[in-house]
Amino acid sequence: MVDPHTPPELRPLMDINQVIHASARLMILSYLYVVESADYVFLMHLTGLTWGNLSSHLTKLEEAGYITIEKLFKGKKPHSIIHLTPPGRTAFRQYKQSMQQVLDDLPD
Amino acid sequence: MSTPKISLKDAEQKAFQSTFADGLWDIYLGCLISMFAIAPFLTTSLGDFWSSVIFLPVWGVVYLGIRLVRQHVVMPRLGTVTWSPARKGKLRKFSLVMFVVNLLALVLGVIVAINLLRVPGLVATLILGILLLAGFTLAAYLLDFNRLYVYGLLVGSSPLVGEWFYTHARISHHGFPITFGITAVIMILTGLLVFVKFLRLNPILATETSSEEV
């Protein structure tokens, strides 16, 4: 909800998707946006996040409905594959557009 | 100070290039190229055809070995990914281009072998060099695999440099064992160095069995 004290000229900043805006989640979504799917290890390798960190961010993204975590098995070991959902793709695209718009309007 | 621009294209490229960070492709290609260095020695005893065919099972074994290393050593460190339709399209284009280049090389080889068009040796050597250079350069471009440009130059120049050795220093077998041999060794050693570096930089990460979700 928008704080009534926020100056109207800065209100677009309050509309920025906070689930995506965190740098780690932005990094994860950027990679998932350009591939079809990836597993935990591949995302850890690319983002440099630790297992626990990645896991907690993926949980937040999954709760928001932006990704799905498909639980499979490789032999006896669990192997999770992460996909960006269509709403996640749309949200990421909207985030990209709104950030571009907000930043373009700022004076140098 | 300016902030670097976030490029999704670069992110995708980085993700894709990471699949070549293990050096296994370098080793495999080096093994393929080594055929040009070893085959001339076998020609006298086995003939042109069998001296080339004998390499097929060797390549098969090397390929299987590399697949096993990839599956058991690289994948646990690198993880798995399914590429976007755009990247899959580029890979299909790569396969098609490689098929055409190999077909051209095969046709050239047959023409030279049966002396169909009476192609002078130097022209055939030149065409072989151009085909090898084109093949490697196109592969480098389509796969975003920059080391292939350097290999393309080395492999593409090998027949011509070999011919020069043959003409000026009377090196046997058109100098192929030396030029292609050096090129193959460079590729295999580069691959091994990259592989060792990959292993050092990428220890096996905590597997999913150790995570809390199990």
Image: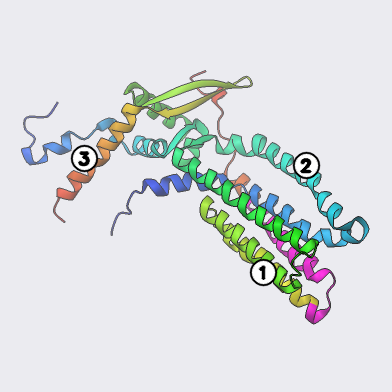
Camera-nearest residue between A92 and B157 = B157
Residue A4 horizontal side relative to residue B121, left or right:
left
Q: Which residue is mark 2?
A: B61
Distance in Å between CA atoms under marks 1 and 2: 28 Å
Rendering quarter of residue B205: top right
- Numbered disc 3: secondary structure: helix
Camera-nearest residue between B163 and A103 = B163
Q: Which residue is mark 3?
A: A98
Rendering quarter of residue B181: bottom right
Neighbor class of circle 3 (other Cα within 10 Å; few <14, some 14-19, many 20+) is some
Say if labels 2 and 3 share a chain.
no
- Whether residue B175 is in magenta: the answer is yes
- Residue B43 seen in the current view: yes
Instruction: Residue at 63% x, 66% y: name it.
Output: B130
Instruction: Residue at 54% x, 43% y: name it.
Output: B92
- Numbered disc 2: secondary structure: helix
Camera-nearest residue between B42 and A50 = B42
Say if labels 1 and 2 share a chain.
yes
Distance in Å between CA atoms under marks 2 and 3: 54 Å
Chain of the residue on which disc 3 is drawn: A
Neighbor class of circle 2 (other Cα within 10 Å; few <14, some 14-19, many 20+) is few
Residue extent of the magenta highlight: B167-194
Give the image location of residue B126, x and y in percent: 68, 70
Foreground mark, 3 or 1? Answer: 1
Q: Main secondary structure of the magenta part?
A: helix
- Amino acid found under the numbered disc labelled 1: Ser
Outermost residue on the bottom side: it is B168
Foreground mark, 2 or 3? Answer: 2
The quarter of the image holding the N terminus of chain B is bottom left
Give the image location of residue B81, x and y in percent: 51, 35
Q: Which residue is mark 1?
A: B157
- Amino acid found under the numbered disc labelled 3: Ser
